[in-house]
Amino acid sequence: MQIPDALWLAGQARSSASGGWLELIDPSTEEVWHRVPAAGTAEVDEAAALADETFRNGVWSAASPYQRATVLFRLAALLREHSEDLARMEARNVGKPIADARDEVLGAAKAFEYYAGGISRFGGETIPVSGGGFDFTLRVPIGVVAAIVPWNFPCPMAAWKCAPALATGNSVILKPASLTPLTALALGPLAEEAGLPAGVLQILAGRGSAIGDYLVQHPLVRKIAFTGETATGARILSLAAADIKRVSLELGGKSPNVIFADADVETAAARAPLAVFGNTGQDCCARSRVIVEASVYDRFLDAFVAATEALVLGEPLDEATQVGPLVSAGQRATSEDYLALARSECGRVVCGGERLRRKGWFLTPAIVDGLPSDSRVAQEEIFGPVACVLPFGTEDEAVALANGVRYGLSGSLWTRDLDRALRLSRRLECGVLSVNTNSSVHLEAPFGGLKQSGMGRDLGMEALRLYTEVRNIYVASA
Ligand code: NAP
């Protein structure tokens, strides 16, 4: 498969655009290796008009669930067929380990398969209204959906939005992050080959600073499905309010990893590194607040540090690599600034925080202890390889530490006490909590955050609700 070098508009590649160009830099070499056109407002207008037209003419929105499913299953098959090329492209573009990139591309294919299969089982209900007659609801597509996605998991994020939005009959404008547009752009030609009618899916690489507000406020866009930073989400929400647009937001996190003394502490410590340093810490679900019962604190910390130091840092395309470089110079500088702040707040950097003696935005995974829970390093989403460890004495203290941030996305709880696990499942403020493991994402289950981590749920059948409106119909009977 050729590396995409064009936008996708009206079912065709568009090799130049009014917003100039996006230069893509390989995070492991710091060199420009590719470029793609950047959409400007002219392309947003064009995409919105086409998406609206295709939505209204019913070529996709009125197609039967079976017809839509057939196309989406074909698209999934094409993603599988080209998965190695897509994974290599993604690994190079984001700097992520090739093994992770492969999983993510296959995960994207599975998302299309899941919603292709799910759409025929998603419908309204009949309601026994008083006064007789027949009342039922319909689930109908919303219209033009703007799907705006971040750079950390470009391929799965695009699929998590596009698959349910398309399955339910919407038209979609997909806007990937400027740093990582490639796998999203690759979807265009594959969707066409799969039989998606032209104009149903437009893919606009382009700078959020130049076209973000314009896209969100565009009068033909009826729904915004966003994943990214909390600050950007808040801005989108306020801009969308003027037209009462539908908005779903998957935002930032500062997720807790809570380890009780009665847990399998060794397993918790062995798995803690990838729960926070996977994807080089650039993961909304990163368990970056590690909260450990005081009686096992030292034992846990020693094992956590040893397992972290054993992680293999290196070339994204090397099969053995577990942690690659950060995505950009800016992202590494942010992590380094937080480590300097940690030191100035009397934190102890127990390991990591060092650059490698080579090109590339590498930084060894860092563990900090000794910080107060309300310090900036322990409170703010760093989005890099920095974890802080905090001790607790009682269960109530553990809950207060875990909940004491503005976010509420993921979390882990390690305990062998079933009563405690069930009790804390309700008390911990996490949209997705895992017990005695660190997995947050299951394609079939809803995923999303509480508090400032977002609103709405991706994945599972729940996501189909995000892309449909409920209409109620009442039929009188004599
Ligand atoms: P970001 O800066 O908010 O950008 C996300 C997307 O929004 C990009 O496509 C960006 O375009 C675009 N954008 C920027 N300004 C915009 C505006 N005014 N209007 C509309 N779109 C705009 O986030 P990021 O740095 O790419 O991603 C990291 C963040 O995503 C972290 O906070 C992370 O926690 C969060 N995240 C959350 C989840 C979840 O499921 N909860 C999953 C993954 C990531 P440009 O790239 O051109 O700026």
Image (spheres, grey):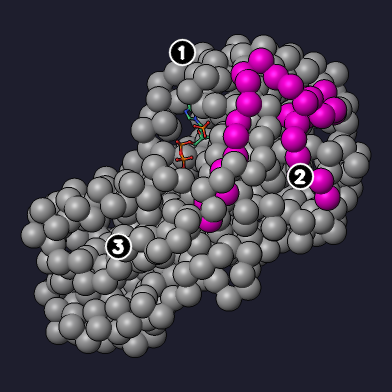
Q: Nearer the viewer, mark 1 or mark 3?
A: 3
Observer able to see residue 163: yes
Q: Is residue 393 above or below residue 18?
A: below
Mark 1 secondary-structure assignment: loop
Say which of 145 and 97 sits in front: 97
Residue located 48% across and 23% down the image: 209
- Judged left or right of residue 313, residue 123 is right
Residue 374 highlighted magenta (yes or no): no
For the C terminus, the quadrant is top right
Say which of 187 and 37 sits in front: 37
What residue sits right under mark 2 in the picture? Answer: 3
- Judged left or right of residue 64, residue 296 is left
Dot 1 or dot 3, earlier in sequence: 1
Separation of residues labelled 3 and 2 (CA atoms)? 34 Å
What residue sits right under mark 3 in the picture? Answer: 353
What residue sits right under mark 1 in the picture? Answer: 242
Residue located 14% across and 79% down the image: 294
Mark 2 secondary-structure assignment: loop
Disc 1 residue crowd, few under 14, some 14–19, many 20+, Cα 10 Å: few
Asked if disc 1 and disc 3 are in contact, CB closer than 8 Å, the reply is no
Mark 3 secondary-structure assignment: loop
Q: Quadrant of residue 392?
A: bottom left
Magenta range: 1-28
- Identified by mark 3, the residue type is Gly
Residue located 55% across and 39% down the image: 179
